[in-house]
Image: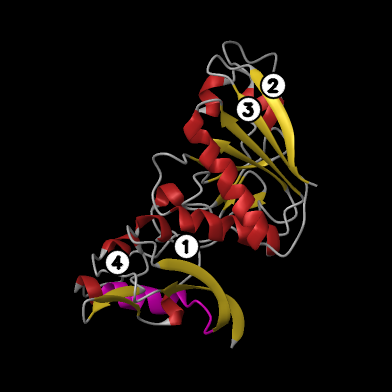
Amino acid sequence: MAVREVIEIDEKLCDGCGDCVTACAEGAIAIIDGKARLISDVYCDGLGACLGHCPQGALKVIHREAEEFDEQAVEDRLVQLRGESGPAPAPPQLSVVGSQPMMGGGGCPGSRAQMHQTRAPDPSAAGQGPSSQLRHWPVQLHLVPPTAPFFQNQDVLLAADCVAFAVGDFHQRFLAGSSLAIACPKLDSNQEVYLQKLVSMIDEAEIRSLKVMVMEVPCCGGLVRLVEEALRRAKRDLPVECLVVGTQGHILGEYQIAG
């Protein structure tokens, strides 16, 4: 067996709500004796699309020896779960956006990991504004796979949710050339998952640098504290800077957190 990423469920935290069961498109999780259980390694793709659906923070992605993910076994299980006599729809497959391969895996189609090609503005395209500099999907920190190819040895921008709406030239000035994750330290739940993912980005994806952008409002300081705690837990050092954005979109301050 190879060492790969799979879901681990903390039985002490699990309350058996079943949200992870419906969030897993591969049918890898079931409620047994009132607790969520991983039925078999072969059904788990390790993408972690279920993480953000657990209200108790009982799920995390770990590296361990595990059987390889088996797409045919997943199809057979989905047929069994649905009670169908014909083949079940296949889970999402590897595909291509532009010329960049997407990560495999399942889960909600809206959280399927993808890599994009960014484009320079085309002056001849009448009525079109500056082009998007977003290089991948998803971007919400609960949904991003922390060791995805778009984080591997990359510069990462971690932005509070409101930043992109406040800063008019956010894409061209700050996002270009970086991978993105967004989060709200006030409204998002299960922030221990955020810490685990940030540590994984630092130690396993070996990101080159981290830029944190927060609004001037006090609640945004929670995102900075999450990053500081992730740095304390991580084994690697890397340069980390923070930019504070005013509610009218101006950069009010910039300082180094690490490096």
Mark earlier in primary sequence (2, 4): 4
Q: Viewer-nearest of labels 3 and 1?
A: 3
Q: Which residue is mark 4?
A: 21
Q: Residue at x 35, y 56 (%)?
A: 53
| Secondary structure type for disc 4 | helix
Residue at mark 4 to residue at mark 1: CA–CA distance: 12 Å
Identity of the amino acid at label 2? Pro
**Which of pointers 2 and 4 indicates the residue nearer the eye?**
4
Residue at the spot of label 3: 244
Find the magenta span and give its range. 66-79
Q: Is residue 148 visible?
A: no
- Between marks 4 and 3 in the image, the one whose residue lies nearer the viewer: 3
- Left or right: residue 65 versus residue 241 is left
Q: What amino acid is labelled 1 in the image?
A: Gly
The residue at the far bottom in this view is: 1
**Where's residue 161, x and y in %?**
49, 34
Residue lying furthest right:
259
Give the number of the disc on residue 48. 1
Q: As drawn, is 199 to the left or to the right of 188?
A: right
